[in-house]
Image (cartoon, rainbow, N blue to C red):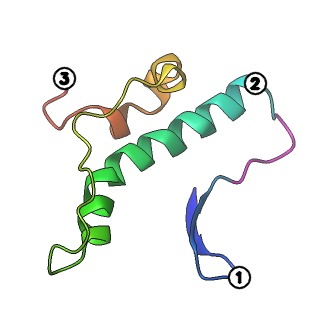
Amino acid sequence: MKFALSDDERIVLAAELPLAGLDRDALGRAVARLVAVCDLLAGASARWLAGPAGGRPVTSPGAAPHHPVVDRYAADVAELVESPGGS
């Protein structure tokens, strides 16, 4: 996974997967990892979008929503979805 800037300066989160060995599970793990990273960044992103003066209110996400793909590949993305206490 990597962050980049698009030609029009939008932030992009991408997963590069090698063609060799690409299958449903490899793609599922990549999508689960992308969703988990987005969930981790949601709160900070909402604060950033609101700006230093509070700006336009942005709905702050509560607990991460339930994502079936993350649940299916939870063992592969455990470091991204489990709390430091190991819950």
Residue 86 in the figure: left or right of residue 20: left
Which residue is nearer to you in this view: 70 or 21? 70
Classify mark 1: residues with Cα within 10 Å, few (<14), some (14-19) or many (20+).
few
Residue 74 in the figure: left or right of residue 54: right
Q: Residue 69, how many percent across, how many down? A: 54, 24
Q: Quadrant of residue 29?
A: top right
Magenta region, main secondary structure: loop
Checking the image for residue 7, the label placed there is: 1
7 versus 44 height, above or below: below
Which residue lies at the image location 65% right of the left edge and 29% below the top edge? 28
Q: Which residue is mark 3?
A: 87
Q: Earlier in the sequence, mark 2 or mark 1?
A: 1
Marks 2, 1: nearer the viewer = 1
**Which stretch appears magenta?**
16-21
Q: Amino acid at mark 1?
A: Asp
Q: Which residue is mark 2?
A: 24
Q: Amino acid at mark 2?
A: Arg
Kindly state the secondary structure of the residue where label 1 is placed. Answer: loop
Q: Residue 7, how many percent across, how many down? A: 71, 82
76 versus 42 height, above or below: above
**Mark 3–mark 1 contact, CB under 8 Å?**
no
Classify mark 2: residues with Cα within 10 Å, few (<14), some (14-19) or many (20+).
few
Q: Residue 53, how many percent across, how many down? A: 14, 80
Q: Amino acid at mark 3?
A: Ser
Q: Residue 42, how many percent across, how many down? A: 33, 52
